[in-house]
Amino acid sequence: MFNVATPEAANCAWRIVYNNDGSSHVFSHPFPMSYAQLIANIAPLAGVVDTFVYQMFSGNVFLHDTKVGEFYTGERCQNAAQNARHLIDQGLDPMQVLCDSAHEKGIKFFAGLRINDLHDLWFEDLICGMKLAHPEMLIGDKGRAPQPASTDWDSWDPEPRRMAWNFADSRVVAMRMALLQETVENYDIDGLEIDFLRYPLFFPPGEEAQYAHIITELVRATRKMLDKKGQAVGRPLELGLIVPYSPQVCEEVGMEIHDWLADGLLDYIAPRATDLFLTETPFEDWKPLLAGCGTQLLGATFTCGKFEDDIYYALASRCRQVGTDGMHLFNFNYWRPPTSQESTDLLKGLGDPAAIALHNKHYILACRKHTTGSYVDRFDVPCYLEDEARITFFLGDDLTETPTRPLPRRVTIQLYTQGYDSAADEVAFVVNGQEIASPRIHHYDEEKDLTEIGCWWTKPQQVTVTDMDVTSMSLYTGENQFIAKLLKAHVEGPRYIVIRHFGVYVNY
């Protein structure tokens, strides 16, 4: 039996913002890259994408013809650097070429800036000269030249603040503003997008509230800069932000997001977890803040693997259900190049309400807790199963049957655990107050690759998979509750069962 617990999503214009995550992928052709090969990144997006965001490489080093920033000359993306330099030497600034091509195809073009990128923690050739020359401008390791921690993507530096710019230093703010100013003045952009998730570490620990006004001043100055250019060119220029997934986390890291919204500084926000693809972003926490301020709310993805289409459709369904203004796709092009037919087909589907409604879905929750200094993405999964574990999950599907809209043929909850011995442990599974009967349990002795279900940066692991058919149970459009209760444990002592992944499959 299915129930509806939330109002219908608003019928409004649907926007898809396509962020190319660092721009190096547009230079993926063998050297020397041609003009035609460069603009081929844009043509397939016509008619399916509203806005193309050219994120200016790492935000510390660059691949366009900047006079303010430092051009990238490292080895890891050497081919991209050679192609970008080859085009620039021919008088073809890649960012302006892509901007012109987007406009020819009716697509808005934004320049994107990672405000405080930390990829130089893992890839030393991304360290810019300014960080090496002025380590006192960084939050950590003051007074000595920074060194990368590790290139192992499974090992996160315990204190990445040491490589982060300290925005309490006025030189850092001036440097960021100079890059934005150059971009606005020299390029025919339709707006700027600032990525505050690369990375949300702006001040020394404990000083976020004291210095938060500095980030606010940066946002206000950027808005003023765009308004001035907009008046000169005769059309408004937009300001979009990628932000931490909840208003509370924004405030904790030193982003006075409530003030920015109340003062009408922003045209859209795309809240998401730092490096995860989720469908449980707390949109309901954002909606009251956006009422009447003119800022669009976009459901944001972080594509960190060759995910199945069903995962994208799940987020699109959730966005439609809660009434967001569209979707924001980040790093999508790396796994699905824009020239591929599968990319075009999926993008078209994400913009089609009818296709979203009846497509199979795979809703996923966080696959790990991502810690960045004192900033932690706090989610229900992963978690330990001690006495019980409670997991909140959201469904975007309209679960009312009509003559033109059938009910899902099958709905399955899938749980990935470690340490769970189904023969010796007694566990009860409950959804929305009803116990789930006859779960099917599979133990994998071999290590299972979890990347395709959203578990990025996790090594293959031995897991137990529990499949639970909940088709006939009471499920709600919107919020639902799942509980796992440990009734009998075969090992004395706490914390030996870990819930690694939680997903819901809706099949039509």
Image: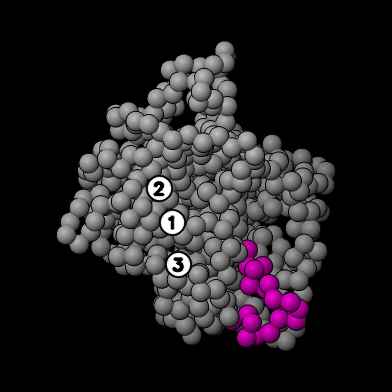
Q: Residues within 10 Å of mark 3 (few under 14, many from 20)?
A: some
Q: Are marks 3 and 1 in contact (CB under 8 Å)?
A: no
- Per the rendered image, the range of residues in magenta is 22-39
> Is residue 129 found inside the magenta-colored segment of the image?
no
The amino acid pointed to by label 3 is Leu
Whole-percent x, y for residue 26 in the image: 63, 72
Callout 1: few (<14), some (14-19), or many (20+) C-alpha neighbours within 10 Å? some
Q: State the separation of the CA atoms marked 2 and 1.
A: 9 Å
Residue at x 79% of width, y 58% of height = 125
Q: Give the mark nearest the N terminus, 3 or 1.
A: 1
Kindly identify which residue carries mark 2. Answer: 505
Q: Is residue 353 visible?
A: yes
The residue indicated by pointer 1 is: 310
| Picture mark count | 3
Q: Nearer the viewer, residue 227 or 400?
A: 400
Mark with earlier residue (2, 1): 1
> Neighbour class for label 2 at 10 Å: few (<14), some, many (≥20)?
many
Question: Viewer-nearest of labels 2 and 3?
Answer: 2
Which residue corresponds to mark 3? Answer: 346
